[in-house]
Image (cartoon, rainbow, N blue to C red):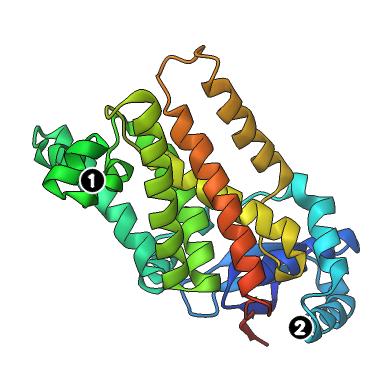
Amino acid sequence: MSESLLLVAFSQERPARLLINYLQVQGIAANYVQAAEPHSHGVHLLDQYQWAEAKQLSDEFIANPSAQKYQEAAWQTGERVNLSSTSIFYWPAMLYHLKHAPFTAVVLFVCLITYGLALIGFTEPYNWLQIFPLQQLADNHQWWRLIGPAFIHFSTLHIAFNLLWWWMLGKQIENTFGLSCLVLLFLFSAISSNVAQLLLDGPNFGGLSGVVYALVGCVWWLGWLRPSWGIGLPKPMIGFLLIWLVIGYTDILWIKMANTAHTAGLISGCLFAVVLSLMKTQKPNLDKDT
């Protein structure tokens, strides 16, 4: 075993992960390495003596990345796939993604700035974003408040959990389907989850969780409805988030969760995935660099 060798690099993370899963199933040791360059998602070979076989398999993948065998390999290895730390916290790569996933970045920074201002005692943004009863909104026409709670967070753990998932899934959807698709999903899920929470429990809530569950539902169902697109979440992640959703209804946690917003968000994301799969008949483009 020697220093890893770059086998192939892609401009998106999804095809790199699919190829790595397939190589691992075939007994070839490979891992994922991210850099800051445009074609930054690298598949690295860990054993130089497997180069010839790995190169042949990678060429087959590039020729037909939507083949069912690659998605089957992803499911087989799903429980063993871990995101490397550089995929989230490597700053040059993060700067690259901020540029190429602008809406994901905008929402992230609005949440961070709003929370940071509240920490130093400037709570006016919270007052400006808080949702009001629907009759009051009909009178004052401050309709932005229907999405406002998505930008409000009440603790460091709360905002860290939400933004981690938003960053991971939001940029995946934006890079794959485009900025307008993510904007529509954000607006649809934010309004749906916030209005549902308002009607059942009143206006005193906040958080991006409803939108995050919509992203989870969208990616989850797209992986089921259109497996050839290569987008999806490992089954353990989906299981964890669904269990967390159920636990929220038991009231055994130390915090009060906006359970209705979570459920409405998940449903809206699943519905969005169904519509997207019906409207978009061709698979998303998998840009690559060989």
Residue 157 visible? The answer is no
* Mark 1 residue type: Arg
Side of 109 relative to 55 (left or right): left
Residue 249, horizontal then vertical, whole percent:
53, 20
Q: Which residue is mark 2?
A: 62
* Mark 2 residue type: Ile
Q: Residue at x 61, y 73 (%)?
A: 279
Q: Secondary structure at mark 1?
A: helix
Side of 76 relative to 222 (left or right): right
Q: Secondary structure at mark 2?
A: helix
Vertical arrangement, residue 34 with respect to residue 170, above or below: below
Residue 263 visible? The answer is yes
Q: Which comes sooner in the sequence, label 2 or label 1?
A: 2
Q: Quick one: label 1, few (<14), some, or many (20+) residues within 10 Å?
A: many
Residue extending furthest toward the top:
252
Q: Which residue is mark 1?
A: 145
Q: Residue at x 37, y 39 (%)?
A: 195
Residue 240, horizontal then vertical, whole percent:
64, 34
Q: CA distance from mark 2 to mark 1?
A: 46 Å
**Of the two numbered discs 2 and 1 in the rendering, the one whose residue sits closer to the viewer:** 1
